[in-house]
Image (cartoon, rainbow, N blue to C red):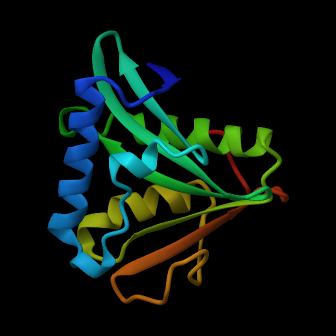
Amino acid sequence: MKIRVDNLQSSEVTALLRAHLEHCRRWSPAESAHALELSYLRSPEVTLWTAWDGASLLGCGALKELDRSHGEIKSMHTAAEHRRRGVAAALLTHMIAEARSRSYQCVCLETGSMDMFASARALYARFGFLNCGPFGDYILDPNSVFMRLNLSSEHGMVDR
């Protein structure tokens, strides 16, 4: 598996991100769907990585800089045909390492509270993310779970 920064120009990546948006919108009420549109993923504070096996796009994930010491995990999605192969764990490991290299003190994320998002929450918990309150522009929402990984302590794990 090769993970690389992506410029969001290929049709494969665009299709995967559209599938991610559709997935989030299918399972979350409109006011609680926080997945970023393609135009926002192209903004300078967001870095998107894609995972590939040869010519096959496996998944993607993004890291948004909220401020100089705080990042947010966004747009984590594994192509349906490649799930349960460690793609999300590899991308998350890569993004946490990048957050550390940027000297972030923590990374946060928002995911759904519905059963459909249980495997995502379990993955984040395995990496040491803990539930927290809303951050950034988020507000308390029963359809959202907010999680935080402190990178300035031993509890911020990256070995997977």
The residue closer to the viewer here, 105 or 119, is: 105
Q: Residue at x 59, y 54 (%)?
A: 127
Give the x, y percent position of residue 132: 60, 80
Q: 141 left or right of 134?
A: left
How many numbered marks, from 0 up? 0
Quick one: quadrant of the N terminus?
top left
Residue 149 found in image quarter = bottom right
Give the x, y percent position of residue 157: 70, 50
For residue 157, above or below residue 108: above
For residue 76, above or below residue 67: above
For residue 91, above or below residue 76: above
Residue 66 found in image quarter = bottom right
Give the x, y percent position of residue 77: 34, 45
Quick one: quadrant of the C terminus?
top right
Give the x, y percent position of residue 40: 43, 51
Q: 3 left or right of 132?
A: left
Q: Residue at x 15, y 65 (%)?
A: 26
The residue closer to the viewer here, 129 or 26, is: 26
Residue 72 found in image quarter = bottom right
For residue 118, above or below residue 56: below
Q: 97 left or right of 58?
A: right
Q: Residue at x 40, y 88 (%)?
A: 141
Q: Residue at x 48, y 41 (%)?
A: 89
Farthest residue in the top direction?
A: 54
